[in-house]
Amino acid sequence: MQWLIDGYNVIRRDADLHGHEAESLEAGRTALLALLARLAGRVSDNFTVVFDGARRSGGAPSAGRVQVMFSRPPETADDALRRLATTLREGAVVVSSDHAVQNSARRAGAVAVSAEAFVEAAIGPAESDDDPEDDPPARPRSGPSRRPSREARDAARVLRRLRER
């Protein structure tokens, strides 16, 4: 499976990654790539991160299971993600919280997941100060079954790949 990741979108949707980006764009990218390297060690999938703009530092393009692409103006990272999703179709998972990118990916046959869901699956849920005993007990559901949409089931399936390893 090929994961296509909207780099800055993911960085700006997670507090820890965004904190690194506050130091510098390079620090934000490095933190995201470190997270993806850990994931690549756990799963057999490939990851391609797409960033807006031209590569300014960092030497040669990356190789291996985590690859980095920079869009070339006038193309944006969103344009590159759409193009890659159209090429890879059912073999791709597009990670972005941009609804236009998600819709385009789904039309191409790829699975789309939000940046927040991806980060949560990759590193686990954020710690909460809430005491679970304070929550009211779950009420039994009544009425017709509420089966999630096909898109939601597909997203849950691919995110499980990251959680279960």
Image (cartoon, grey):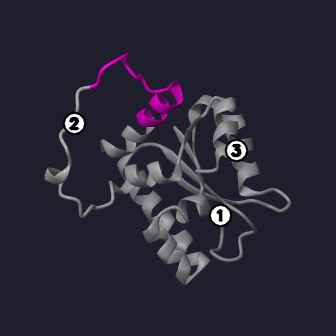
Q: Is residue 62 visible?
A: no
Q: Are marks 1 and 3 in contact (CB under 8 Å)?
A: no
The answer to if 145 sits in the magenta stretch is: yes
SS at mark 2 in the image: loop
N-terminal of the two: label 1 or label 3? 1
**Residue pictured at 40% horizontal, 23% vertical:** 146
**In the displayed structure, would residue 131 be above or below residue 30?**
above
Which residue is labeled 1 in the image?
61
Marks 2 and 3, how far apart at CA: 35 Å
Q: Nearer the viewer, residue 121 or 58?
A: 121
Magenta stretch? 141-157
State the image quarter where residue 9 is shown: bottom right
Label disc, if present, on residue 165 of the rendered structure: none
Which residue is labeled 2 in the image?
138
**Residue pictured at 75% horizontal, 68% vertical:** 54
- The answer to whether 83 appears left or right of 96 in the picture is right
Marks 2 and 1, how far apart at CA: 50 Å
Amino acid at pointer 2:
Ala
Amino acid at pointer 1:
Pro
Pointer 1 local density, CA inside 10 Å: few below 14, some 14–19, many at least 20? few
Query: Residue 35 placed where, x, y %?
Result: 43, 62
Which residue is labeled 3 in the image?
100
SS at mark 1 in the image: loop
Pointer 2 local density, CA inside 10 Å: few below 14, some 14–19, many at least 20? few
Query: Residue 156 placed where, x, y %?
Result: 42, 35
- The answer to whether 53 appears left or right of 119 in the picture is right
Query: Residue 106 placed where, x, y %?
Result: 64, 33
Query: Residue 118 placed where, x, y %?
Result: 46, 50
